[in-house]
Image (cartoon, coloured by chain):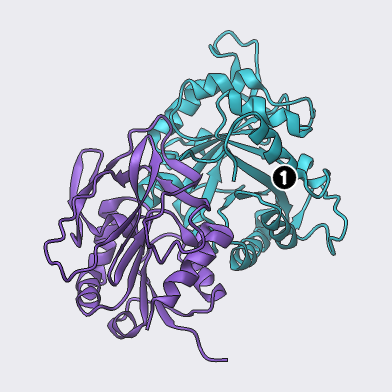
Chain colours: A purple, B cyan
Amino acid sequence: MTAGPKVTVLDYGSGNVRSAVRALEHVGADVTLSHASEDVLNADGLLVPGVGAFATVMEGLKSVDALRWIGRRVAGGRPVLGICVGLQVMFEEGVEHGVRTQGIGEWPGVVEALPAEVVPHMGWNTVDAAEGSRLFAGIEDERFYFVHSYGVQHWNFDVTQPAMAPPRVTWSTHGAPFIAAVENGPLSATQFHPEKSGDAGAELLRNWLKTLR
Amino acid sequence: MTVAIRVIPCLDVDAGRVVKGVNFEGLRDAGDPVELAHRYDRAGADELTFLDVTASSGNRETTFDVVARTAEEVFIPLTVGGGVREVADVDKLLRYGADKAAINTAAVARPDVIDEITRHFGSQVLVLSLDARRTDNPSVASGFEVTTHGGRRGTGIDAVQWAKEAAERGVGELLLNSIDADGTKDGFDLEMIRAVRAAVKVPLIASGGAGKPEHFPPAVAAGADAVLAASVFHFGPDDAIAQVKQAIRDAGYPVR
């Protein structure tokens, strides 16, 4: 049996990362929990978890110099998967309780409060999977586990370079449509928690592993 | 696209063993919470809740072991309550693999702990477990009073006001348990659910009184986003979760 792809789960003090590690191992990845540059840069895939406040996650990422490592991986075409607030920080800005925090800015857009009657958006919701999505292949009609009060409600990515593959954007709805996942070359992210989404989540992680190496 | 109504089995754990008993065919060891968690996951549970009812805090370590072993193999959200008093308790639960912590008596005693925990880990991590009962006490405007110590002690605090305050302080979710209905198998206290629903925006988990699948849709109609029960799953048929979900689906609500 050959070893699965090497995945580093970025360790910067964010919530329950044990589940992410176990879920990836469950689908065959060789997982390391670390923020050491060699682990972060050399892995076939880097998973960026994130729970809690946007500003807290950004602080945590900065404290382990992760912005640089994420940028370098993406520039080099090396896969990165953000989860939950790990999706949100890939956008330009987060606005929570009136406080604006600059994000990593890989994608244009602002993370704002969901205009829903009940928040947080907590539980299993369906998605409108992007045409040609690799992450959602075979699981387009499944439900995934979301826990969040904020989301990106507009996608304004202007692809001016014709050589660039168009990003695939998957949507869900809670009060208003919001971005549930983005697949953009090496950089992918999900607003929901695949590591907590049972069999459907495991399949999504398996699909991501297939894109590595 | 509408979020599904969650169906949540609750396991009372004492020194690492499920109490209140379970009654399943083919279960090797009916008292093992990890085995039961696995079984409920395969049966379609949307989340799991462990309530640590261990009397002596010295035996709590076994609960952490149960949490860790469950998180190793069950990939749905796991909430753990019982003995949560401060930020450090939540931190420890998360490190062992819990996704959310439920707080009850400690928050009534010192509400600031809600702000402290949610500031540290975010709202999504904290569930306020609210045990309420009906009261004639004229100072309790809603007629529903907060109790502590598993419903044994009244506090004179208005349950609707407390739910509102806890949500303002930052809890991400409310687990509303009717002490009067608990164990009756006569159905949920729908008036209580309606009263709390009208006061808060956070998701509401209804608990207490479920005896059969038909009891669940009215709780959803009254405003519950999720339903939690123990004995109806422990002592029900092996497909009890599927039956509950079917009843909710038949009433026109989405389920997973």
Residue extending farthest left = A160
Task: Name the amino acid type tagged 1.
Answer: Ala
**Residue under the point 55% across and 48% down:** B84
Whether residue A140 is situated above or below residue B199 in the rendered picture: below
**Residue A19 appears in the picture as rendered:** no
Q: State the SS at label 1.
A: helix
Q: Outermost residue toward the bottom?
A: A1
Q: Is residue A95 left or right of residue A29?
A: left
Q: Nearer the viewer, residue A212 or B147?
A: A212
Q: In this view of the protein, can residue A152 be seen by the observer?
A: yes
* Quarter of the rendering containing residue A102: bottom left
* A185 up-or-down from A155: above or below: below
Horizontally, residue B65 falls left or right of residue A210, namely: right
* Residue A75 position in % (x across, y down): 19, 76
Which of the 4 quarters of the picture holds residue B207?
Answer: top right
Image coords of residue A212 (percent x, y): 38, 79
Q: Which of the 4 quarters of the picture holds residue A63?
A: bottom left
User: Which of these two is toward me, A182 or A59?
Assistant: A182
The C terminus of chain A lies in quadrant: bottom left
Quarter placement of the N terminus of chain A: bottom right
Q: Chain of mark 1?
A: B
Query: Which residue occupies 83% across, 45% down?
Result: B237
Few, some or many residues within 10 Å of mark 1 (<14, 14–19, 20+): some
Is residue B45 rendered to the left or right of residue B118? right
Residue indicated by mark 1: B242
Q: Is residue A84 above or below residue B146?
A: below
**Coordinates of residue A183 in the picture (x, y in percent):** 32, 63
Residue at point 46%, 22% (across, down): B199
